[in-house]
Amino acid sequence: MRTETAPVIRLEDYRPSDFLIDQVELDVKLHPTETRVIATLAMRPNPAGRSDAPLVLDGDELNLKSVALDGRVLSDEEFEASPHSLTIAQAPRQAFTLTIETEINPTANTKLMGLYRSSGNYCTQCEAEGFRRITYFLDRPDILSVYTTRIEADREEAPVLLGNGNPVESGSIDDSGRHYAVWHDPHPKPSYLFALVGGRLGRVAESFTTMSGREVELAIYVEPGKENRADYALEALERSMRWDERVFGLEYDLDVFNIVAVSDFNMGAMENKGLNIFNDKYVLASPETATDMDYAHIEAIIAHEYFHNWTGNRVTCRDWFQLCLKEGLTVFRDQEFSSDERSRPVHRIAEVKTLRARQFLEDSSPLSHPVRPNQYREINNFYTATVYEKGAEIVRMLKTIIGEQDFRHGMDLYFERCDGTAATVEDFLNAFAEVTGRDLSHFARWYEQSGTPRVKVKSQYDEAGQTYRLDFTQVTPPTPGQAKKEPMAIPVALGLVSHDGSPLSATCDQVDERGVFLFDKAADSITFTGVTSLPVPSLFRGFSAPVKVSLDLPNAELLVLLRHDTDAFNRWQAAQTVAMRLLASLSIEGQVADEEIDAFSTALCAFIDRDAENDPAFAALVMTLPSEADIAQEIGQDVNPDAIHRARSELRRRIGAACSKRLQRIYAAFTETGPYSPDAASAGRRSLRNACLDLLAAADPIAGEALASAQLEAATNMTDRLASLSVLTTIPGTVRDDAIAWFGERYRNEPLVIDKWFTLQAAIPEDQTLERVKNLMQHPAFSISNPNRVRSLIGSFAMLNQVQFNRADGAGYRLLASIVLRADELNPQLAARLLTAFSTWRMMEISRRNHAEEALRSIAQKPNLSRDVGDIVSRSLE
Ligand code: ARG
Ligand code: ZN
């Protein structure tokens, strides 16, 4: 279908389905190329629907074998079928049973939507609209049905057969070599939560007693031989379950909870009821193959999918416009979990870094959209940082505004009201409005208005009157489809800090007992009284709102915050803001006064002396400069990535040189001893040591090369090994070449490690990288049909390598465009994701912008683009 012809789906057009499906019985006979599916649907007209409507079921690339109504096979005149729909014009006006037989080919399914094969195993992905690739159905999230699934397969090929819900029955089929299993899920659910798995899989299991004393069997299924790599995920699952009981009073509701890891998966993972399916990179971990960051991601995603059992499954979404209802809320919940399990400030900083790198970027691009979009052409393109991460920030702001207790009460009411229903954002907000008696209609604008608000703050101290005034203004820039913007309700968590860190006893009426000022007009001011000396304002503590702030404070005052603020987030933020100012000036003007750089280095050295050893993870974050992509976003227009790269290298070099004694001391003192443990404290020590290595190598590449090679040899875990290899990749020469070759050979049989190896090489900021990437695409481990491989090599090139993707000669853009077109023929979702790397094209300087536009147009002109790619490319060019 051509881009222009893909219909636009609008929120305002929502209406209830004309029919309901109360029960679904699926009989699936697995076969590599001819899987047979018999769906028996107990249906009835929906009292809330139209009474004269035909029955129209969704399909996608289906091959219909037969259809029967109440047991009677229908003749060709009684229905109309195509691969993408099945229509019965004269459907009964009372309850009826529809039986549909389809045949599907899981081996040919390269889109990885519906039923497909991964490393020979059968698995499914149905969100958002994959169920219609298995059978004809009312494939929309407000159709809730009770499912019973019978799965049959060759016992040799698929000894393990898993479905949603609880196992009911299993057995052999005579002496055919085939066997079957029946699963029943008593909880009504939408079709996007359906799943089945069949294959040869290893298993680790554990039993879990819920808070009310029910026994649940937890199991994780992985490639045979890799069972011990699932231990960490299993333990993270138990901690997640315990946490949800403790923090939200939410208990698991089936006898089993299964997780299956597969190696071909479009996203991170999927929360199918009782049968989560995961991208194996978010399950498998061992010290030899996974980094500290991998362990943290596994913990977070295991939790995320588990938490969906309540926020997503028990309460689901009425339609796909409400996606943030489950995703934003569930991201918020997994973030809270990780913060409780690890260091809250360190985790908050990591969250904000991702939010800015991905969501702020998206919101300033042609792909900007509201957290609850009001229209789409292809829903898969709306599983975005905005829906997920900004969606989570909205929930966090709500909690900040109403307070912890009321937040919990609101959540309780939400579950009480909406359990077992397909709900909307309004249902969610109503629960909080009701428990607090607050009008949340202004706050609700966060769901509707796209773009990142910019807040400007001016400060004024009146020494005689001992008052301190802060003047706030806010503006949200225009975004696609929204030229005019309204002011937002922005919670500003704030405090005042004295220059020497001594406590200040100032007060302000407009700030509530939690230290929050609700800034909800275009302009507003607040005044503190009893301010005995000139303070430094600490604003948006803990990043209390997803906005961009500009402050009229000189660097020296910001550095007071780095030293004295009680809010760890703002200590980090102060250092980042100063670094960003230096980096932006260095990029644009090519230089900044030595004194300014020296003042920053001196403050960092002092910080290292005072704090590095006490909180290594935090220190590592403070010592890491904003990325090249962050700097590009800050500059925002006529971006020259080469200048940014030079600027960042220069500042790293200067800081590394100024602090080298200290960095060496810490590097030596934090040498790893004892066995590896992925816990946050140990990970923090490694991250500090590796941050030191990075700066030392920036200041002195010869010494850095020696240090990094020694570390590569001595390393006992993947974190340290990868960090040293990463430093080496930036220092051209035979040491680097040998290290890359050695690493590639050593992990030849570890696809998830080869992914890291691809990523490091794709990110090398030198001209030869383009050829290197092309050559790596010929590497035996690379495959254009495996999403992890493609994202590691191609996605990293486009998203991490600012200078080479945005080459002045346009070759980076052309390479990506050609790969997007190739990938689109196999896997449109994957291709569309890659294509979003172009979302920054309009902020580039003119010659790069022209090259990027040309590459985008070359894609747009191609006939037979998928809806996914067609949608992204047309919005990118608008
Ligand atoms: N609901 C999944 C999650 O936990 C994501 C699934 C996205 N699937 C897709 N086809 N876009 O976030
Ligand atoms: Zn999710």
Image (cartoon, rainbow, N blue to C red):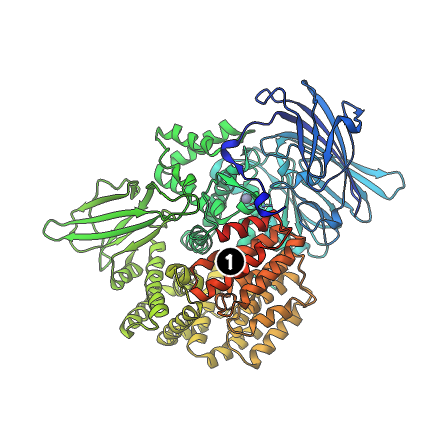
On screen, residue 17 versus residue 551, left or right, reads: right
Q: Residue at x 61, y 61 (%)?
A: 818
Percent across and percent down for residue 458 are 23, 52
Q: Give the side of residue 426 with respect to residue 457, left or right.
A: right
Quadrant observed for ligand 1 in the rendered image: top right
Identity of the residue drawn at 58% across and 56% down: 859
Eyeballing the image, is 160 above or below 19? below
Confirm if mark 1 falls within 8 A of ligand 1: no
**105 relative position to 348: left or right:** right
- Residue 309 visible here: yes
In this view, the residue farthest toward the right is 175
Q: Nearer the viewer, residue 462 or 630?
A: 630
- List x then y, in percent, for residue 319: 54, 34
Task: Name the residue beneath numbered marker 1.
Answer: 838
Residue 620 location, quadrant: bottom left
**What amino acid type should be assigned to the residue bearing mark 1?**
Phe
Q: Residue furthest top?
A: 94
Q: Which SS class for mark 1? A: helix
The residue at the point 56 percent across, 77 percent down is 736
Q: Is residue 456 left or right of residue 646?
A: left
Total number of numbered labels? 1
Along the line of sight, the residue nearer the viewer: 116 or 717: 116
Frontmost residue, 349 versus 295: 349
Q: Is residue 245 visible?
A: no
User: In the image, residue 161 lies at what x, y percent?
Assistant: 74, 42
Mark 1 residue crowding within 10 angstroms, few (<14) / some (14–19) / many (20+): many
Q: Position of residue 308 (x, y in %)?
A: 55, 40
Q: Is residue 443 above or below residue 346?
A: above
